[in-house]
Amino acid sequence: MSRVLGYLFVLIFILSLNFALPRFLPGDPLTALVGEQDLIISPEFRQELKQRYGLDQPLAHQFGQYLVRLLSCDLGYSFYHQAPVSAVIGPPLRWTALLCGASFLVSTILGIWLGVELAVRRSRPWTAAVVGVCLVLASLPGFLLGMALLLGFSLKLGWFPFFGALDLVPQVSGSATWGSGILRHLALPALTLVLAELPGVALLVRGSLLKVLQAPFVLAARALGLTETRIKYRYQARNALLPLITRLGLRFGLLWAGAVPVEVVFAYPGAGQLLFQALLKRDYPLIQGLLLVGILAVLAGNALAEWGYRLADPRVRSRTWY
Amino acid sequence: MQNLRDSGSLGAYFRRARRYPGAFFGIVLLTAILILALAGPGLYPYNPWDYVGKPLEPPSLAHPLGTNDVGQDLLSELIYGTRTSVGIGLAVGLLGVLLSLSLSLTCVLRGGLWDFAVMRLVDSWLTIPPLLLVLLIVAFVPPRVPVLILALTLFSWAGSTRILRSQGLEIKQELYIEAALALGASAPYLARRHFLPGLYPLIILNFLIQTRRAILLESSLAFLGLADPRHKSWGMMMQYGMKFMALGHYWLWWLLPPALALGLTLVSLALIGFGLESRFEPTLRS
């Protein structure tokens, strides 16, 4: 029960923050709705806008209205794009989902493999070097890695395109080239996120695996004559997976947030890039809508991860589901 | 016995440091960066806001790292930026660790409903991605340095609180705590005399972690153009330098120096932290 209460608390905190922040702006919340470039509007129009947005109502009533609008998926209206926020953020969110999903999958799978190898072969000299590299990579911000990759592979070597997500000239010959264009544009930003994310996974798996390397159940498995691969993944790594799964939701959130500067570096047309543009133009409804959707996605991811934790660990499963 | 006797001397210190070459390297690096930050104003050749040269000058004797697009000296910017980036990081680290220490100590000493409430708050707080929420805040509140420090602190305390609390609970099981309690020790006395020394290595470790995370977040914010415009920082320098990345070799003296400075700072903090961790958790040592 307390878990659900916790999520509820965070949800209410974020919604109230989202509601309160525009009201802290110098001037009045109307600035947040129409943007600073549209400040020169006649007093009558201003009054009309205030009425239309219910800004003359008491705060509690406004908050209620805000929640009702959110429930009907109305995130506001972007005056810069002249379109509802929910329509503006749709396509970029798909690109971000592609980018984050791909790098999340790759970094998790490769990270588990690397972590297991690093722990099992801990006495070899090269593992110390790899751990060192992981440590360095894990402590660097994503946009730094991104800039290095962009500079090296796109600008100097010319192997990959340096902006966008699609080939500019649509090829006549159908979906194969179109698909390869998407992949070539995706490669570097995804690689950046994988490089930023993988070392953390590997170090975590290595750390928790080192604790069970000499466990009695490993000896028992070996005595049964099981193959080393089976022992490694079926018996040892399963224990190491538990801390990883609890962090899945958290990691997804960090990845999602880390994608913002990385998309800016590669001018990838995802939600991060859109957010950057919105920040530059002070398009407040768009900023709020994007961040709200992002945070809600992360919260949902966390809840999912908790559910997955129950599947993976029989010791937790027996407790009540909430 | 031998070890115990000269464990305080400088020679013994260096002998021990050799066993943790990474951490030793990190400490040397971090000290150099801190000296750079402290001595900054005396070191930089020009005021980083003065237009002292022609725009986009390549490196020369007068301007070792050249000038930017409005003719400001880049080396001065770099040294000035040390103070902003590292200063914000240290401030957040200090505030954050104080916050998590006081929360975790009250949790351990008082227990009960307070402990329950704080830990549920920690659980849910950890699910919030800090960058997104800080972005939301500084998009609306002008990102002055104090605002940045407060916003970053607001999202850095939770993890450390959990770690410090669980270690504190272990200390609470010790016999000497029971003895002190039997002798009528008060909670503040227990905290000062027993918990603080016991938690000391973890406090340092969490301070390092929070500082590192704050520097990383601050640089990302500055890179997205959401930093205090009155204080130049490494991230801001990179944000401007990025625009000239494709132009000739400008990245060599405009982008690379702040990137290296930021990278080395973060790596040195991580190395010290990793050394500490493997010192207190020997299973992690390879």
Image (cartoon, coloured by chain):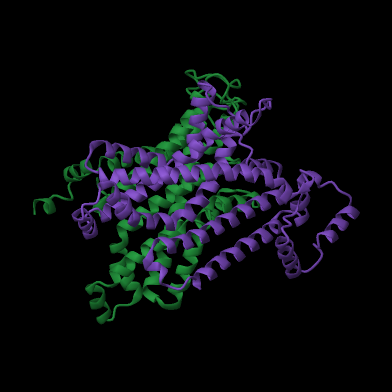
Question: At which x and y percent is residue A11?
Answer: 60, 63
* Residue drawn where x is 34% and y is 46% of the image: A115
Question: At which x and y percent is residue A5?
Answer: 54, 70
Residue B15 lies, with reference to residue A292, above or below; the image says above
Residue A107 lies, with reference to residue A184, above or below; the image says below
Picture quarter containing residue A96?
A: top right
The residue positioned farthest toward the front in the image shown: A225
Q: Nearer the viewer, residue A107 or B137?
A: A107
Residue A207 lies, with reference to residue A307, above or below; the image says above
Question: At which x and y percent is residue B182?
Answer: 25, 81
The residue positioned farthest toward the right in the image shown: A44
Residue B152 lies, with reference to residue B254, above or below; the image says below
Q: Colour of chain B?
A: green
Q: How many marks?
A: 0
Question: At which x and y percent is residue A223?
Answer: 18, 55
Left/right placement of residue B280 relative to residue B227 reads: left
Q: Colour of chain A?
A: purple
